[in-house]
Image (cartoon, rainbow, N blue to C red):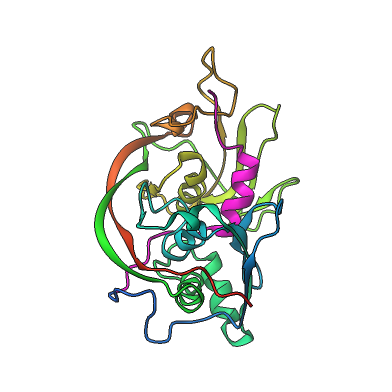
Amino acid sequence: MVRSFCLAVILSTSSVIAQTQATQPSSTSATQARAPAFDVVSIKPARPGQGWHFGFGPTGYSAVAPLSWVIHAAFFGSNMGGKDSVIGLPEWADKEMWEIETTVAAEDMAAYERDRANLDNPNPITRQMLQTMLADRAKLLVHRVPAQMDAFAIEVAKGGPKLTPAVPNEPQPSASVTLLGGGFVVPYNRGEAARIIYNSVSMSTFAHELRGMAGGPVLDRTDLTGKYDFTLSWLSLGPDEHEGFVEFGDPFPLSHWNFGALGLKVQRIQIPTEHIVIDHIEKPSAN
């Protein structure tokens, strides 16, 4: 069975929910000393047939999804939790769909906007607000346990990088998407040659955007501090492959892309993380 993540979908999702690290508060509860909270919260069972969506938008968090997805977003960045990152969820939390709409208060908007775009903040206000919401509306209590997870690291290959330094203040390319970490990306569409064009993108932003393709954390270990223009092209095309698509469960999905042409390489690594264990949870109180 051939399975993958169409990049156009990944980019639109990751640019909405882009975050970086699992939160690391010392408290063993989802509630903290009056953590930041959304100004308005609406939670109700989703209507049959409602389409999935989830993410931090310009004015707040919005979702039609199982509560398990919301919990993951509250405690982990995009693809940062790893397998079994949330332990002890009841069955309903994975199966029942909820419609959630929130609004950020005007006095918190500056911090919210900053943290939506800050890929390096380990405990952004965005996730703090979700944690407060879950503690209030679903009576969520958790504790943390240390764990290890699979990850990938981008490094400079032997011979050095083959990247073009970006021109300062270059205009946004046609058909491109603005990345929260800065710069632009032009995704490919189904049926087109699988290549992704990046403009004025740092390696840290590049690593973050690769998480959707990798299915897990990607760390920038290049030590490159500039912004670059480059194109990542499809490399592997076996007899059972479709260009731009990777088999479900592939242990090294990034190996199908030509990082070598950029003077880069990708290594599989293990990194320390934390899992959360559910101590108490209830179905969200309706509005």
Residue extending furthest toward the top: 239
Q: Could you say which is closer to the camera, residue 140 or residue 198?
A: 140
Tell whether position 105 is magenta.
Answer: no
Q: Is residue 239 above or below residue 232?
A: above
Residue 180 visible here: no
Does any portion of residue 50 appear in the rendered image? yes
Residue 129 screen position, x and y as percent? 50, 75
Q: Which residue range is magenta in the image?
A: 1-25
| Residue drawn at the location 56% of the way across and 56% of the way down | 96
| Rendering coords of residue 283 (x, y %) | 51, 68
- Name the residue located 55 percent from the left edge and 27 percent from the top edge: 234
> For residue 75, what is the image quadrant?
bottom left
Q: Is residue 6 magenta?
A: yes
Between residues 147 and 90, which one lies in front from this camera angle? 90
In depth, the one of 200 and 88 nearer the eye is 88
Where on the picture, by quarter, is residue 251?
Answer: top left
Check the image and name the residue furthest to the left: 146
**Residue at (38% x, 74% y) in the render:** 30
Q: Return the residue nearer the eye: 131 or 254.
A: 131
| Vertical position of residue 100 compared to residue 136: above or below | above
> Residue drawn 49% across and 53% down?
94
Residue 149 lies, in percent from the top left, at: 31, 47
